Image (tube, rainbow, N blue to C red):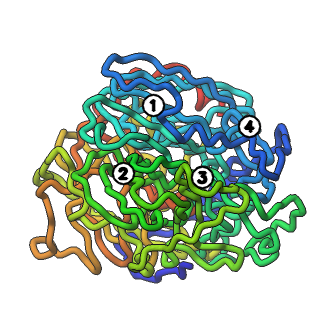
Amino acid sequence: MRSALFLVLATFLSVISTTTQAARIANIQNRDQVPAGPNINADIGASQPWNDPSEFILGKNNFTISSTPTTRYYDWIISRQNIAPDGLMRPMLLVNGMFPGPLVEANTGDRIVVKVTNHLTVGTALHWHGMFQNGTNWMDGTTGITQCPIPAGGSFTYNFTVPTQWGTYWWHAHAGSQYVDGIVGPLIIHSPNEPHLEEYDEDVIVMMSDFYHTTTAPLLSYYLSEESDGTEPTPDNGLINGRNSFNCSNDALANFPTNTTNCVSNSPQSVFNFDAGKRYRLRLINTGAFAEFQFSIDQHNLTVIEADGTDLQPAQVQRIPIHIGQRYSAIVTANQAVDNYWVRAVMNTYCVGDNAALNLTTTAMVHYNGAATVDPQAPVSDSQDWGQPQYIGRCLDLSADMLKPWVAQDAPPADVTYVLNMSFQKLTKKHVSLGYVNSTSWVPLKNAATLNQAKRGVTNFAASQFVISMNQTQTIELIINNYDEGSHPFHLHGHQFWVVGGGQGSYLPGKSPLNTTNPVRRDTATLQTFGYTILRFVNDNPGMWAFHCHIDWHMQAGLLVQFLSHPEIVKTFKIPEDVKALCGAA
């Protein structure tokens, strides 16, 4: 999709060495691959033992929403298995043999304890997407930044509390591209203080993702080569809650054909059972690698009530654009005729490239109880899509006027401003298109973590690590310029930010409009094409925090910067011995 943007940004860009590029490729070959291991060939047909639809219906698990804290224990094994989420068998990385992985569900104030045993032949780590990790920065799960990988054959226990947050989150691998190969799952935090609790009857998780039939190692090797010319791998399919069907004859048309014979064309799709008259909270999560989706249900309005853990004033829409890493909650009322209705997650054509094997529309089914029985392997409905445009040609978040937080909070004036320039450049001797934040293309450290280095008082980090040190509790303003023809969903670890402005072209201080009156607060925002985005956050969470593009290919290409919050406090951190030991074992 992307051709390199040749801008002369002499003050911002520098040449990355051939040695650094070689290290990046070595990381791909040694870490990102789906490794050898237990090879359990699951059934391809209607039976999908790796996928449990009941995991996504929160009301069926006897969970009690409470203000009394408790500890939630989980024991996970990460392993390799061959499964067929859409009918085409491929190697994947699974947690407890499940895809998507197990649900983590807790109340505000709870402690979450997850023991992870790594049965892969390469290291891994898990990130708790959206969790502030205040006081437990070392549990953020970001390899090369807050920890080294959990070694092959080793175990590690994540242990953190959720003192103030509630809403919709997710967990995923943050080691190479492993989450694209299957290490993902939902993370839901409840509270009796949620303002919309009485506005819905049922609570349902809807995870959507693009899906590749080829494992990430060869895709990344291709992408980070001169041959790709900066064109990202385009997905072969999409999934809703880990399911979809695929026309096996299209494999030959794919950009990267698998040539497998282990494929069936009628793999079951997800079905959501509705009772007429009930109200359903749908927790939408985009867990993909590349594509923004436009989510809708035929003939049913969606009332948005949450974005990235922030409760919102209700806003009614027909479609919700959701980019990678973002979450929305929307209430849908089963107020149509008793029938079956298509659920649609449409990849925005402006945000993905070409692949003749790809059907841009991923579908599931809403089945009203009492309607004609739905065969998940051959769902049928006469329902019609909404008539208004699907935002084709635009990769933007819902407009600011639709995303008003329930608890009003104005964005404070900026105390410190940083300008971040995002671009793709061919500056290596091998003419590989890499991502740059100002002058740096990030490469994950090997056998080291920048948090551990900061703890020791390091201030001069490796050339591949762009670290911004922030010493005081102040309001930080980021002026982010996107010098690229593609949009970028940027995620900030450890914080929420106010989205106070954005537009096409260049930001003009004092002239470009800003909205500081109760703007949306979230942790993942889309940087629009050839435009600017203005974010503000309070530097009140000591630690080392990543800020990166959540298009996985782009992060692997270098689009990541780190914020070192309160370095003097970080030097006093009591990082647990088992965390520090990971760098010795990596």
How far across and how far down the image is residue 471, in percent? 23, 40
User: First in sequence: mark 1 or mark 2?
Assistant: 1
**Residue 62 placement (x, y as % from top left):** 49, 25
Looking at the rendered structure, which numbered label has been put on residue 342? Answer: none
Say which of marks 2 and 4 sits in front. Answer: 2
What's the residue type where badge 2 is placed? Ile
Visible residue check, residue 583? yes
Q: Which residue bears the numbered disc 2?
A: 331
Which residue is labeled 1 in the image?
138
Q: Quadrant of residue 379?
A: bottom right
Report, in whole angstroms, how far the alpha carbon at label 4 lies from the one at label 1: 24 Å
Q: Crowdedness of circle 3 by 10 Å Cα count: few (<14), some, many (20+)?
A: many
For marks 3 and 1, the one nearer the N-term is 1
The amino acid type found where label 1 is placed reads Trp
Marks 2/4 in contact by CB < 8 Å: the verdict is no
First of labels 2, 3 by sequence position: 3
Q: Amino acid at mark 4?
A: Ser
Q: Which residue is mark 3?
A: 271
User: Which circle, 1 or 2, is nearer the viewer?
Assistant: 2
Residue topped by disc 4: 79
- The Cα–Cα distance between marks 3 and 1, rounded to whole angstroms, is 39 Å
